[in-house]
Amino acid sequence: MVQMKKGTIVAALVMGSMCFGHAAFSQETPTPQTETQQAQGPQEFSDAELESFIKANTSATEIQKASRDSIVAALEEENLTLERFNELAKAHRQKQLEEVAEGPDEIASFSSAAQQIVKIQPETKEKTQQAIEEEGLTVERYEAIMKAYQEDPAVQAKVRQLVAND
């Protein structure tokens, strides 16, 4: 039971780092405080902060998974695969949608799915921010811990130790 829990939480951290990481907030510009913190080098995180990070990351990962499921459902509802949607999105960005699409019905399906996805993304971001803040962290602090977790073996080891002790 404990082994399964540890594996699940570590998987959630890995998944969260891939899904949430900096990409979820990539549209936000770093604050001078964040840049200063990054320039200072390694940061120290208390056990309490890391515990909050683990809980926030688990919640964020669940929110991201639900979001991906909603996006897949929106695509399936419009009879599009993720690959085809991405092809059409690329064509749309290049102003070649009419040339790439198989007809007006596929363009309408793409448009409908895109509108649904555009609604899902900000909701996901807001829910994720709330989950982080509910654990007593700011988004900036969460991202700093995530960055450290991704780059610093000592932080990874400490997080794994905390997970193992749960």
Image (spheres, rainbow, N blue to C red):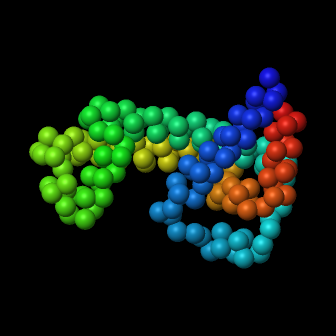
**Residue sitting at x 27%, y 34%:** 79
Horizontal and vertical percent for residue 8? 70, 34
Which sits in the foreground, 79 or 119?
A: 79
User: Does the rendering let one see residue 136?
Assistant: no
- Taking the image as shown, residue 123 lies to the left or right of residue 164, namely left
- Taking the image as shown, residue 79 lies to the left or right of residue 66, namely left
**Quarter the N terminus occupies:** top right
**Residue sitting at x 32%, y 33%:** 76
Which sits in the foreground, 51 or 130?
A: 51
User: Does the rendering let one see residue 104?
Assistant: yes
Q: Residue furthest top?
A: 1
Horizontal and vertical percent for residue 141? 69, 57
**Residue sitting at x 34%, y 51%:** 86
Give the answer, above or below, for where 67 lies relative to 46.
Answer: above
**Quarter the C terminus occupies:** top right
Res. 75 image quadrant:
top left
